[in-house]
Amino acid sequence: MKESMTYTKAFEELQLIVTEIEQGEITVDELSTKVKRASELIKVCKEKLTSTEEDVNKILKELESEN
Amino acid sequence: MSEIIRDKTVFTLSEVAKSVQKTLAERYSTPFWIKAEMNKLNYYSHSGHCYPELVEKINGRVVAQMRSTLWSDDYLNINQRFLNLLHEPLKDGIKILFQAKIKYDAQYGLSLHIMDIDPSYTLGDLELEKQLSIERLKKEGIFYQNKNHLLPLLPQRIAIISVETSKGYADFMEVIENNPYGYRFFHMLFPAILQGENAIDSINFQLSRIEKVKSHFDVVAIIRGGGGDVGLSCYNNYSLARTIALFPLPVLTGIGHATNETVCEMTSFQNAITPTKIAEFLIQKFHNFSVPLSESKVKIIRLTKQQLHEKNGLLQNTARLYKHLAIGMISENKYHLSQLSRSMMQEAGFRFRTEKNRVQNMAQSLGKDIKGILQQGAQDISTLNTTLVRGSKSRISNQQVAVQTLEKNVEILNPLHVLKRGFSITLLHGKAVRSTNELKPDDNVLTQLFDGSFESNVKKIE
């Protein structure tokens, strides 16, 4: 859940940055920082698209222990 | 025929049976329509015949029960019509309207010989059951509950309820696993029976297992396919539809059929006609995440470049404007300066000439003035001279008179005149003696007279 929060927030933050840039709300001074941040966020999100960390064995163990 | 035993008319069992059979045959000569619940179909695959167990219930209690027969040919015919209309075979636990003859067999007793069953009656009943499920769920306020879940941005972890060998599962996995976009899903199969009456308990059981480990999943997918449109009335079951409605995760259904939507499909978060569509739904969610992501990247690059370009242009324009203005200002000031310089020269020349004239004028008038002043001064001096001479002369003559008078007075005061009159002056050590106190005996004194002097010695002082 924690992980999903991270990518959801990253996605939202990215959208915000894009909107800010689109509406010209970012000054040239901030631009470099914002673009750097955006590229980090894109990286986090792209990674999420192509990887998962769930483990079938762990889930099976949980199912057994509670049965 | 009956015989008499100990005065009693006695029948054999077969005679009674025959009699009953005859009576019933006469009384119930034509077939008629009956409605009943088919508790059990009792299909014998070996013979192909069915021996349905029929009941009538009031408030769940059996008030009538009868056995029946359905011969193989009739069964096949009727079952096909059921499948055509209901997409359900003849099965246990349905209400049927059937045409039957009452039959009595000496060996098997009373039963109903089913000749025909009207599938539309059963359809209506099943439809009614479906409607009742819907109404009940709506009344409980949970009909749309599963739809209120928020699907995570990336529904990535899927608990799948399906049959591993089914075509639907294979279709689903094909789309999920071999998507060309590189999207990664985590999935785990919870195997269950997916059609017929047993599906209800089987699916409910797996849902309860998934609920225990729900934190590992984003979504549940119930996937069936390849089994035709038969045996789906279980998805109209109230209890299964309720479990799905109340399930803590979004439930996706891809049951795969062309008939009316079942209640479970209605209460699920999202229904799709086929498992493939469910998989595509999930892929679409990934697209919805991925596309804006790629677009963001492109947008940011484009907008950043654009902004920098704009600012650069603005800067250049400003610089150009500044240069232009500066040059303009410099040349303007230069012109102004030369103008000023020229006018200053003119002014200075003019001023110089004016001043020169003034000085000349002044010099001229000053010359005149000086002459006047000098004449006046000379005049004053001569006047003063005359006055001075005149004043001096009178002053001198006045002084001469005063001096003459003084001389006369001085002459009068001359001691000679006194001495002539007989007075003398006694001098001691050159000083005039004015008192006897100044003298002592034996002093030598000099006495001055008019015509000479003499020395004398003091003898006595009185």
Image (cartoon, helix red, strand yellow):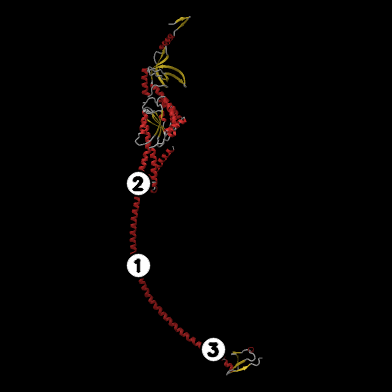
Q: Chain of mark 1?
A: B
- Tell me the SS state at disc 2: helix
Q: Earlier in the sequence, mark 2 or mark 3?
A: 2
Labels 3 and 1 in the same subunit: yes
Q: Position of residue B427 (x, y in %)?
A: 60, 91
Residue B198, located in which quarter of the rendered image? top left
Give the distance between the C-alpha atoms of the residues marked 3 and 1, in whole angstroms.
79 Å
- Tell me the SS state at disc 1: helix
Q: Is residue B142 visible?
A: no
Give the distance between the C-alpha atoms of the residues marked 1 and 2, in whole angstroms.
62 Å
Q: Position of residue B158 (x, y in %)?
A: 40, 33
> Which residue has dot 1 on it?
B348
Give the crowd class for mark 1: few <14, some 14-19, many >=20 residues within 10 Å.
few
Question: In screen coordinates, is B419 left or right of B274?
Answer: right
Q: Earlier in the sequence, mark 3 or mark 1?
A: 1
Give the distance between the C-alpha atoms of the residues marked 2 and 3, in whole angstroms.
131 Å
Residue B438, located in which quarter of the rendered image? bottom right
- Tell me the SS state at disc 3: helix
Q: Position of residue B268 (x, y in %)?
A: 41, 31
Q: Position of residue A47 (x, y in %)?
A: 38, 39
Residue type at mark 2 is Lys
Give the crowd class for mark 2: few <14, some 14-19, many >=20 residues within 10 Å.
few
Q: Nearer the viewer, residue B212 or A25?
A: B212
Specify the quadrant that holds the N terminus of chain B.
Answer: top left
> Which residue has dot 3 on it?
B406
Q: Nearer the viewer, residue B38 or B359?
A: B38
Count of numbered tags: 3
Residue type at mark 3 is Leu
> Which residue has dot 2 on it?
B305
**Residue under the point 35% across and 70% down:** B354
Residue type at mark 1 is Ala
